[in-house]
Image (cartoon, coloured by chain):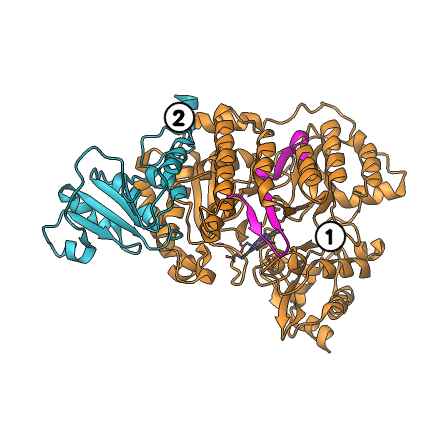
Chain colours: A cyan, B orange
Amino acid sequence: MGELRFRDDEALEQPAVTLDAFLDQSNATAVRLEPDEDARLLIPHLDRLALVEIAFPKFRDGRGYSSARILREAGYKGELRAQGDVLVDQLREMRRCGFDSFAPEKPLDPAVVKTTLDRYDQVYQRAADAAVPVWKLRHG
Amino acid sequence: MYKYDQYDQAIVDARVDEFRDQVRRRMAGEITEDQFKPLRLMNGLYLQLHAYMLRVAIPYGTLDSRQMHMLAHIARKYDRDYGHFTTRQNIQYNWIKLEDAGDILADLATVEMHAIQTSGNCIRNISSDQYAGAAADEVADPRPWAELLRQWSTFHPEFSYLPRKFKIAVIASDEDRAAMRLHDIGIQLVERDGKLGAAFYVGGGMGRTPMVAPLIKDFVPIEDFLSYAEACLRVYNRYGRRDNIYKARIKILIHELGADEYRRQVEQEFAHVKSLGIDPPAAELERITAFFAPPAFEAGAADTVDRSDPDFAVWLDQNVKAHKQPGYAIVNISLKPVGGIPGDASSAQIDVMADLAEQYSFDELRVTHAQNIVLPHVAKRDLYAVWQKLVEADLASPNLDLISDIIACPGLDYCSLANARSIPVAQKIAQRFSDLDRQRTLGELKLKISGCINACGHHHAGHIGILGVDRKGTENYQLLLGGSGAEDTSLGKITGPGFDEDGVVDAIERVTDKYLELREGGERFLDTYRRVGFDPFKEAIYG
Ligand code: HEM
Ligand code: SF4
């Protein structure tokens, strides 16, 4: 499984441009963020973006999780893709941070993807997904 | 004590299933050791010198007899019949087989325990005051707040791949029994206008660059508590250094930014995060707090103790502390018998402590950061019976806070990062000072040993600290003086050139002799050191 997508709309064909190129007022609708780039710089432009690709050069580098949430918190509705050293055991956290598509460098086993994503029914905290935290279930 | 509901249990059960699957994939070669490492680490499984080590979480150091018995069972069934209680109020097993790890977690889950986030670059087990709920000086029981943090931080999706590990401590007294300001976040509950809130100290830590955390926010009300923590972590996750593992802790970020700039960034992030609805309603804290309601103390319980047995009286004076409830006392069980391994307990001893808790302490135990065990609520009339049973189990060393109550990391006997052994040094020191009268004459003296610069043994915070280094291939020990992990937090200073194993024991003796010569009135070693300074001791050591 090369690409993994959790969206109903058509995948965008346009390649993602760098943040600098994008801010340099290109007409691009797809942008790629490196781990050290500030996702907040995109906030003024969210309505013209259809794809934000966040790079994970190393799976240990967790900055992209914050970038994803920041974009979702700002109301971004387009595709949010994790690209790079993305491992199956990270999908759940990434989904919760708002990623809805994945382009892992090493293909993932679809069966393991499914069990991984289905495993937990409950979450403890609110994040960028629709999951309802258990304190909310406890107190309504 | 907190009890799981169906949600807590479902999460822990799912974790057992997940980890079994991860181990299976690793053993089948579907994932590499490099990919498996962060997964097993997030579950407390380290690869050490000889075997896997499993670290089991004891949230805020509190457990009941059923859980304690389970810890004994695991030691018996899967390890070599003992466990090691750690400075982070957890327990470690040193001889674990990878293929057993899933079964161990399943056994733990039956008693509401787990190994979640006991290692790895995530938010670790929350630590707290071992006298919580029993200490007269607390503004509230800190554990409900720690439990809120436990739940919030468990599988936090944004903070599972932080630059480095992240340790949080929560206390609620002015007297600090948890080394609060030596944590990434240290929280002290405080009262203001009749309301409870949290003071946040951020950016403390030990390791190779020890730092005492500065105060970042003096009062965070409960309704903002988790949002504020989230903001602190988000700034760190985004801007903490990832280029150099030795500079990746939050203390370095705050040191480089300055506390004021870090605070500004956190406040800005908080203003945003607060709008996200992260904080549970007040009812959730109330729900959790109800689990920590004081036990059914007997009103008017006898407040006197028969001291006629002299050995008992010695133990009473050293290991038993005042309780807020008249007629009750806090019992400290020392895991530091002379010649033993600090923090180790056999499964039989663990069972004894569990039984004592059930019979005499409202079914509660605590683990302390000094690697001892506490029975928090013992009726004074039962103290003698408890002591007798401890004596039988070789658990009655009357040395709490004395020089032989040593904190020591596993060191070169177990740890793959070690430069030197810690355990034999601890044993030699305890032996040298084994005469109890001599120890009591020296009074409170906190001695802490680490086998390398990572400081797992808190050597920076020892009144006397020992740091194992490697000098041209041989084990060498540096001596530090003047550290403290209490409310008067300070970092020890290295005396000078290091010593070999026997040399460091001699040097400590020269330091304690000097102290006895210099001390005035009721001064502790640390007080004398602070009054007279470093030089007299340095001279005594090196001549
Ligand atoms: C034996 C396997 C162990 C390994 C490989 C290990 C590794 C480390 C490392 C690398 C650090 C430094 C982290 C940093 O500065 O960023 C550290 C710190 C620490 N470890 Fe361990 N450790 C081990 C066992 C223990 C044990 C048994 C304890 C408790 C008794 C412990 C408690 C701590 C504490 C309290 C710190 C200091 C935290 C701080 O820097 O703020 N560790 N450990
Ligand atoms: S201080 Fe060093 S030797 Fe001791 S346990 Fe930590 S890493 Fe190992």
Q: Does the magenta stretch include residue B205?
A: no
Q: What stretch is highlighted in magenta?
A: B42-68
Q: In front: A140, or B298?
A: A140
Q: Give percent across and percent down for residue B188.
A: 52, 43
At x 19%, y 44%, the residue is A51
Q: Give percent across and percent down for residue B23.
A: 51, 42
The answer to whether residue B227 is left or right of residue B12 is left
Residue type marked 1: Ile
Residue type marked 2: Lys
Q: Can residue B327 be seen in this view?
A: no
**Picture quadrant of ligand 1:** bottom right
Q: Is residue B56 magenta?
A: yes
Q: Can residue B395 be seen in this view?
A: yes
Q: Mark 2 points at which residue?
A: A136
Q: Which residue is at the far front?
A: B28
- The quarter holding residue B65 reads top right
What is the quadrant of the N terminus of chain B in the image? top right
What is the quadrant of the C terminus of chain B in the image? bottom right
Q: Which chain carries label 1?
A: B
- The quarter holding residue A35 reads bottom left
Q: Name the residue under label 1.
A: B341
Q: Give percent across and percent down for residue B400.
A: 74, 48
